[in-house]
Image (cartoon, helix red, strand yellow):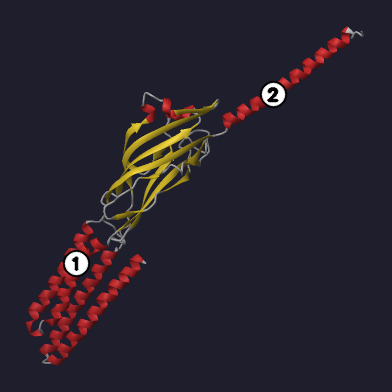
Amino acid sequence: MLSVPRSQSTVSVLSRIAILTTCLSVQIIVNAQDLVKNSTSPDTTKVGIFINSIDELNYDEGSFSANFTIWRLNKAREFKDYYLYLPMNSIDLDTLVASPRLHDQTENVVIRHAGDTIFWDYYDMTGKFRHDFDVRTYPFETEELTMEFEGNMYYDHYVDLSVDQLQSGADTLKLNGWKVSKMKIFAVDRMYPTNFGSPGEKAGRVYSGFKVVIPIAREGWGLFCKLFIGVLVSFLIAFFSLRINITEADGRFGVCVGAIFAALANMYIVNSNLPLASRFTLMDGIHMVVIVVIVGLFYISTVSLKHYKAENLTKSQKIDRRAAWVSLGVFVIGLTSAFIYFLM
C-alpha cells in the first residue's frame, strides 16, 4: 500500500480549506449584496378605496360630503404606524374606525410564507371635500366629484404606489336629482418646487398619491320647468300687452313694467340658489333674452302711441301686429341660441 507523504497530505488539506473558504466568502458577498439591494429598494404599498355614500352637495360652501373606507397593504412593518395617504382637498375629516388602533391585530398581519408578510390597514372615514361647481349650465350640470389623496411622509418614490383597482369601487350611490356614473381611480404624482427648508436637499420633491373621480349629471328638466315658468309668464304678460288697445296706453305700459320686474325677481330667485359667480349661466342668458324682448315691446308701445296721437291708427295697429310676430321669433331664437351656446 502506497503512503502519501506528510507534506503532500498537508498541502491537499490546505488547498481544500482554501477552496471552501473562497466559496464561503463568495456566498457571503452575494448574500450581502442581496441584503443591501433589498434594504435600498423601495417598498410597494397597494392602496384602495370604497365609497359608501356621497351626499350634501353644498353650492354655497363649494363642497360635498363622503363616507368611505380606505386601505393599504405593505410588506414593511415600519409603514404600519404611519397613515401614508391623506386627503388633500378635504375641509373636514373624521376617522370612525382605524385598524392600527384596534387591540387585536392578528387579522391585519398576513404571513404567506417565511420572510413574506403583508400588513393590512384600513380606515373608515367621513368628511367634506372641496369642489368648484360649474353652474354655467345649471340646471343641466355635469360634475366630477374629486377626492385627492397624497403621501404625507415619503417622497421621490421611496414607496412605490400601486392602486387596488380590483377591490376599489363604490356602493350603489344615490343622489336625489342626479345620475351617478361609475367611479374612477388612478395614481398621480405631484411635484413641489421646494425642499420645504430641509438643509442639503435639492428642490423638487415628488409625492405620490391617487385620485378618485365620481362623475355625476343632474336630471334637470323638472327643475328647469319650475325655474322657467316664472320667466315664461313674464314674457307672455308683456306679449299679450300688445292686445291692449293703444287708447289704454297707461294700462299697456303698466303691464310691460310689471313684466320686467317679474322677470328680474325670478332671476334673483334663481341666482339665490347658486354661489355668487362672475360667469354667465344658462339661466342668466334666458332671463336676459326675456328682459330684452320685454324692453323691446315697451319701446314698440311708445312708437305705436306716437302714431296714434298723430291720428294714424292704422299704422299703429300694423306696428303692433308685426311687433307680436317679431317678439315671438326673437324669444324662440334667443332661447335656442342660449341652449346651443351653453349645452352644446
Whether residue 216 is visible:
yes
Q: Is residue 72 above or below residue 30?
A: below
Q: Mark 1 Cα within 10 Å, few/some/many (few <14, many 20+)?
A: few
Residue toward you, 186 or 311? 186
**Residue shown at the point (46%, 34%) measured from the top left:** 73
Mark 2 sits on what residue? 27
Quarter of the picture containing the C terminus is bottom left
* Rendering quarter of residue 264: bottom left
Residue 59 disc label = none
Q: Identity of the amino acid at label 2?
A: Gln
Left or right of 11: which side holds 65?
left
* Separation (CA) of disc 1 from disc 2: 85 Å
Q: Is residue 9 above or below residue 329?
A: above
Where residue 217 appears, as percent x and y from the top left, is: 33, 57
Where residue 302 appears, as percent x and y from the top left, is: 15, 82
Where residue 106 appears, as percent x and y from the top left, is: 42, 25
Q: Mark 2 Cα within 10 Å, few/some/many (few <14, many 20+)?
A: few
Q: Are marks 1 and 2 in contact (CB under 8 Å)?
A: no
Q: Identity of the amino acid at label 1?
A: Ile
* Rendering quarter of residue 295: bottom left
**Sequence order check: which comes first, mark 1 or mark 2?**
2
**Residue shown at the point (18%, 73%) measured from the top left:** 235
> Which residue is at the far right?
2
**Residue shown at the point (61%, 30%) measured from the top left:** 37
Residue 229 disc label = 1
Left or right of 96: which side holds 305?
left
